[in-house]
Amino acid sequence: MRIVPHAMMAVGRCRKLKSMKVHYLEIVSADVEQTCRAYGGADFSSPEPALGNARVRKLPDGGLLGVRAPMSESEQPVVRPYWLVNDIGAALDAAVHAGGEVAHPPLEIPGHGTFAIYILGGNQHGLWQL
């Protein structure tokens, strides 16, 4: 089962860490072009509206790297990994049980899957279910 680290700790499955996969690594940046150049510029897509106008490129393991600008004046730059999970509801419940706070409930992005965000230890963590 693919599940986030905090959820695994909550259910005593730390031995499964090797099966974890980051499906989407999101970088919210004040300078999208500069950030994309730093990560191989030409390999990024044009802005994808469904992903907040992120410019996206495939990673060698099949995951995705997305770079986008803040979507509001209050959004701060952040690097947020989205862990691939089989059951986003169960994974989010386990993260909350481990002390996390839901920042964004599960939301389907047509053609991309469902994501959720929680905060734990002052850091933002994402979940992604295909």
Image (tube, helix red, strand yellow):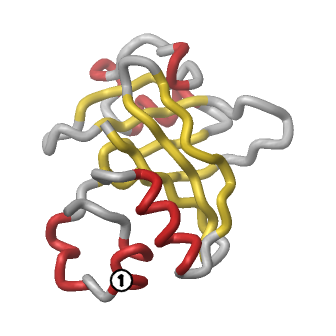
Tell me: 25 left or right of 17: right
Does residue 4 lie above or below 113 as drawn?
below
Q: Residue furthest right?
A: 73
Tell me: 22 left or right of 92: left
The image quadrant of residue 20 is bottom left
Q: Residue furthest bottom?
A: 12
Picture coordinates of residue 64, whole percent (x, y): 31, 36
Residue at (49, 30) in percent of width and height: 108
Q: Nearer the viewer, residue 6 or 66?
A: 6
Q: Quadrant of the C terminus?
A: top left
Picture coordinates of residue 94, whole percent (x, y): 47, 72
Dot 1, how many residues are within 10 Å of its Cα: few (below 14), some (14-19), or many (20+)?
few
Tell me: 43 left or right of 124: left
Picture coordinates of residue 14, whole percent (x, y): 26, 84
- Number of numbered discs: 1
Q: Which residue is mark 1?
A: 11
Residue at (43, 53) in percent of width and height: 81
Residue at (25, 40) in percent of width and height: 63
Does residue 3 lie above or below 10 as drawn?
above
Q: Nearer the viewer, residue 38 or 91?
A: 91
The image quadrant of residue 24 is top left
The kind of secondary structure element at disc 1 is: helix
Residue at (55, 43) in percent of width and height: 106
Q: Amino acid at mark 1?
A: Val
Q: Quadrant of the N terminus?
A: bottom left
Picture coordinates of residue 39, whole percent (x, y): 35, 37
